[in-house]
Amino acid sequence: MPEGDTVHQAAARLHTALAGRRLTRFDLRVPRFATSDLTGHTVLDVTPRGKHLLTRIEGGYTLHSHLRMDGAWKLYAPGKRWTGGPAHQIRAILGTEERTAVGYRLPVLELLRTEEESRAVGHLGPDLLGPDWDPDTALAHLLREPTRPLGEALLDQRNLAGIGNVFKSELCFLLRATPWLPLGELPPGHLAALPALARKVLEANRERPVRNTTGRREQPLFVYGRAGRPCLRCGTRIRLADQGDGSRERPTYWCPVCQSGPAPASAPRTVTRRS
């Protein structure tokens, strides 16, 4: 599940493989850009912005992609078999003499003028892993809707960019608040510390292949994916319910003892798993 940390890692891999190299193949398999051809142009850089990837190319072009739930960029050496999925799932091919980057199942893929990047990412709040990170601005954005549930506010990329569903659940646990607690009802100290805590968690996972919020190798996460298992603090079984606005609900995990605040309006999911 792509979040700010995995997108940052993907950008680093793509940048290392492509930046400074001339494109020998440029193939976008989406109708709007299918005839675009930047073969012969040099890739300048690959930069993450929240959960977005910006591949900047000589001539003032930017290839904007977003992985969402299932998208992936894979790198292949010449002659190697492409194993990221069936051919009909390929949306982009960027080839150089040394490596080929293949984009699979990319729900967002568009070719922009670099000067127009703000059209794609200008709505985003401060990037938790980016040079524009500003905790005061992030907190001000969060406080614009103090009645909004904490979990929903954390997922809103207009507030702060880079948090996905895993870190949403983990941050709520670390804040000792349920994801349904109105943001403005967080204790003042916890609210003030929220941006710095989010930054610390994502920074700690910037280079990790496996996310870890607990510091324990054998049990890397406090609540996410642990429904029905005992809380690592109190032993109460972790619960699972959906959270969202109805159009896009996300599986959400929490401890009913360690985390204070309201429970979901709908009944939690039934979990049969036992530790």
Image: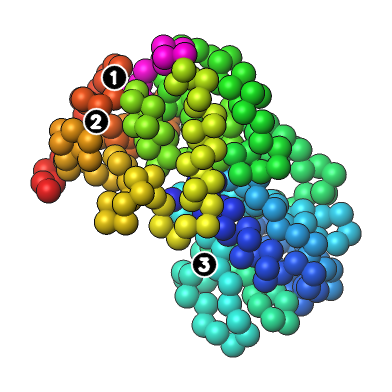
Q: Which residue is mark 2?
A: 255
Mark 1 crowdedness (10 Å alpha carbons): few <14, some 14-19, many ≥20:
some
Seen at 70% across and 53% down, the residue is 47
Mark 2 crowdedness (10 Å alpha carbons): few <14, some 14-19, many ≥20:
many
111 vs 262: above or below: below
Seen at 85% across and 44% down, the residue is 115
* Magenta-colored span: 178-188
The answer to which of marks 2 and 1 sits earlier in the sequence is 2
Question: How many numbered badges does the structure rendering display?
Answer: 3
Seen at 84% across and 68% down, the residue is 41
Question: Position of 267 compared to 7: left or right?
Answer: left
x, y percentage for residue 254?
28, 32
Q: Identity of the amino acid at label 1?
A: Ser
Separation (CA) of disc 1 from disc 3:
47 Å
Question: Position of 121 compared to 197: left or right?
Answer: right
Q: Is residue 183 visible?
A: no
Q: Secondary structure at mark 1?
A: loop
Q: Secondary structure at mark 3?
A: helix
Q: Which residue is mark 3?
A: 88
Prevailing secondary structure of the magenta residues: loop
The answer to which of marks 1 and 3 sits earlier in the sequence is 3
Q: Quadrant of residue 80?
A: bottom right
Q: Identity of the amino acid at label 2?
A: Cys
Q: Identity of the amino acid at label 3?
A: His
Separation (CA) of disc 2 from disc 1:
9 Å
x, y percentage for residue 257?
21, 25
Q: Which residue is mark 1?
A: 260
The answer to which of marks 3 and 2 sits earlier in the sequence is 3
x, y percentage for residue 5?
53, 50
